[in-house]
Image: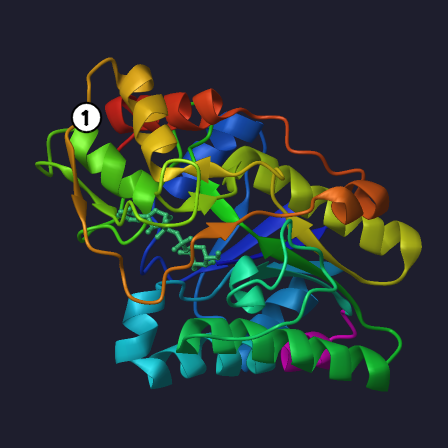
Amino acid sequence: MALLAAGHEAVILDNFSNASPMVPERLETITGTKPIVIEGDVRDRALVSSVLEEHQIDAVIHFAAKKAVGESTQKPLMYFDHNISGFVSLTRAMEDQGVFKLVFSSSATVYGDPEQLPITESSARNHTNPYGFTKLVCEEMMEAMCAAEPRWSCGVLRYFNPVGADASGLIGEDPRDIPNNLMPYIAKVAAGDLPEIQVFGDDYDTPDGTGVRDYIHVSDLAKGHVLSLEALERDGKGHVVNLGTGQGVSVLEMINAYSAACGQSLPYKIVPRRAGDIATCYADPALAKDLLGFEADKTLEDMCNSSWAWLQNGKV
Ligand SMILES: O=c1ccn([C@@H]2O[C@H](COP(=O)(O)OP(=O)(O)O[C@H]3O[C@H](CO)[C@H](O)[C@H](O)[C@H]3O)[C@@H](O)[C@H]2O)c(=O)[nH]1
């Protein structure tokens, strides 16, 4: 999904392949502002160009990418097409229309297996799968674009592990297939759709032996995008920042927190490690605070409560 903002007007371009068509209506309920919704694909340069022109767009938030690591190893070309061709097509359309402000969804995946913790933005970049490769390539393309054309200013946001749902309970994640990620999997077990959680390894070098990640509430993440856009307008230059809380949470801590939120003790079993997983990953969030004034303020409890509320009320 690409959200293109001109002044206070929001224009959403989406092909609805993953998102529910109910999202724009629910967005309106939450924000009180009716977004303009255009059905289409970010790889359609002519369409994007016409949208930018017609609505006098001055900045773009680019979310239109695929994000499942496992799928990317099976279908790398599909990932290159959506994530890399889509990026090139979008930015060429922006260039055609003289729009040079871009907020980009990057990922902590660009750090590969981190050399040091917490992870700072100057840590070495690496990729361990085709999905991570696409994020790294887009980051490098932005560096080249900005070096060649000073009018570009790009806000590169390296997400850690986004979880939770909007506090209204109206918008959240509802994977169609068996979820790959921990929180949606736990949520399906809590809802009775799956029998038990599989914990991928309890022999990591972490306090309880299970993997540790920096989970960030999606509402905090959304706030980071607004601050990034504002910084692009204010500073006239780009930034590359981590969006995380700086706190590591283990798989067992997450299961316990979700059990408290849904009021039942969730069943789990320890299974072998998942290939490609690392022990620990959490952000140094200091630069995002310095450059954007960003600070994540939602707790682990907020993340679990909002996910559970969405499952009960909002799912369509
Ligand atoms: O059913 C599950 C799913 C996950 N885990 C564990 O839970 C932790 C989190 O796993 P996720 O799959 O939720 O998230 P990852 O950290 O593996 O990956 C996420 O964060 C990465 C950056 O660190 C990339 O951005 C990637 O796209 C994104 O899915 C890991 O220790 C994993 O082993 C389980 O034990 N059981």
Q: Secondary structure at mark 1?
A: loop
Residue 64 painted magenta = no
**Residue displayed at 84% across by 47% down:** 291
- Residue 56: x and y in percent read 73, 61
Residue 296, x across and y down, in percent: 64, 33
For the image shown, how many numbered marks are present on the structure? Answer: 1
Lateral position of residue 4 relative to residue 188, left or right: right
Q: Is residue 97 magenta?
A: yes
Residue located beneath label 1 in the image: 266
Magenta stretch, residue numbers:
90-99
Image position of 98 with respect to 65: above or below: below
Coloring applied to the structure: rainbow
Task: Say above or below: 213 vs 300.
Answer: below
- What amino acid is found at the position of numbered circle 1 in the picture? Leu
Which sits in the foreground, 150 or 268? 268
Query: Which residue is at 78% across, 70% downward?
Result: 100
